Amino acid sequence: MPYRFSLILLLENDSVTYLHLQNCLIDKPRYFSGLKNLRTLVLQQVFVKKTLLKTLCSNCNHLVDLTLDGCKITSKLVINNPSLLRLNIVNVGFYPRNLITIIASSLSSFEYSCLKEHVVHQMNIQAPMLSKFSFRGASFSKRIGLSGLTNVTTIKFDALLVDLSTNILPHLFSKCPQLEDVTLKNCLFTSSTQIFSSKLRQLIILDSVWVNNSPSEISIDALNLSSFEYTGYTTRIISFTAPMLSKVFWDTLERENRPHLFDPIASLPHIENLAMIVDTLQVKELAKVLVRFQNLRQLELHIEGACDPSMDYSWLLDIATASQHLQKLTLSIKNLYQEHSHMVGFKRQKSEYVGFSHNVLEYVEFCGCVCSINVIQLATHLLRSANSLKKMTFRSSDRVYLGGGRWTTFFNACGGHCWSGKNVYEMLKDEVNEQCQLIIL
């Protein structure tokens, strides 16, 4: 049950700079004149009326952070504060959707979200300095609009059920000409989509859905695009006009049986930083693509699936040979099935990989289920022939990037006792020279 909190407790208290009220009913004394030095106000699970915010924020000339989290907004709301920098109205539930008017001449960041499938608020945003806007909700109507986002440089849409292809993207970059960073997460597409912008620098498309299985195209024409991230449940034809693109993250796990899976990657041989999540069944096809890349400086491959102790990893040497600028190589393997040790019973045999030599590679990491004899053999070749190698690290766990700033940690699941730092050390110690560290975690 909500408790009652009276603002009379804060009368004539000018020392309060941070106030967080949760799950309470707020009583307003007649002569309450605000908190003059308040900088941060957080209301969580509170009934919010226009008069409440007006009372709390009156004379708050130093207020810079305002958060309404899970609040019940029961009337039209006006947020008028010239000092406000960051505004969060999040986790709004099922209540009447009255107009929210925001008049904040210094506002730089605004996040809005409502609970799944609930109707969003109408908004009137008057914030000429607004540069970062995040929106999660089922619809983004004309009553919210893009007109108040003219100077926004960073925008994120999440869980939209309106069609991005026809309702938002055709107008987004013309209405928001300063956009540099765009994230589209869990959104709906119904047809081919064109993204055209001369200022766009980062584009992230995560877990979005197309309503049919037709090969609709995403056409990206962005001369200054430098970073692109993609995960999704359906493979699309993705074409790029992005000569400055240097950093790519691509998750292909959901589309292991699709033809031409790596065609978009194959069209980007100029990129320098590539991180991918792939299935064990996709490795052979991927290797054919990456050996054509000559400008890679960092390559991170996370492989998931049934662990195959006999899998040959010499193709990574082919990729390194092609990419003579490669400085860091990371291989992580997640075994989805518990199996018996695949190191027991194997004896390392001397072998040479003819023609491999690398003068730039400095850092190599092996993470997860990397205790097979073929991984050890790959490590041996790198220790012998990567002339600038400074550090090689083995670890049984790995922190894997999932796109959009999301990370997850997994631990070796080979089963048995195959992971043994002592075994790895004994197999590789004779190959380590004085300039290189062998680190086993």
Image: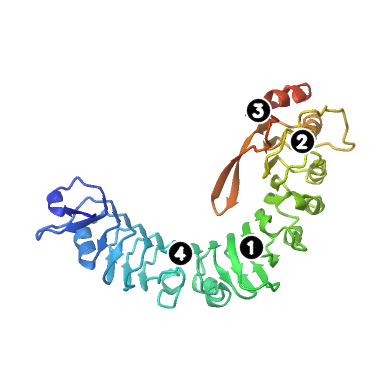
Of mark 3 and mark 1, the one earlier in the sequence is 1
Real-space Cα separation, disc 1 to disc 2, in angstroms? 31 Å
Name the residue that disc number 4 marks. Answer: 136
Name the residue that disc number 1 marks. Answer: 233
Real-space Cα separation, disc 1 to disc 4, in angstroms? 20 Å
Instruction: Identify the image quadrant of the N terminus.
Output: bottom left
- Contact (CB < 8 A) between labels 1 and 4? no
Q: Position of residue 22 (x, y in %)?
A: 27, 52
Q: Secondary structure at mark 2?
A: helix
Real-space Cα separation, disc 4 to disc 2, in angstroms? 43 Å
Quarter holding residue 321: top right
Residue 161 position (above or below residue 153): below
Real-space Cα separation, disc 3 to disc 1, in angstroms? 36 Å
Give the amino acid at mark 1.
Tyr
- Contact (CB < 8 A) between labels 1 and 2? no
Give the amino acid at mark 3.
Ile
Q: Nearer the viewer, mark 1 or mark 4?
A: 1
Q: Position of residue 217 (x, y in %)?
A: 68, 71
Q: Residues within 10 Å of mark 1 (few under 14, many from 20)?
A: some
Tell me: 251 left or right of 88.
Answer: right
Name the residue that disc number 3 marks. Answer: 440
Q: Nearer the viewer, residue 122 or 1?
A: 1
Name the residue that disc number 2 marks. Answer: 375
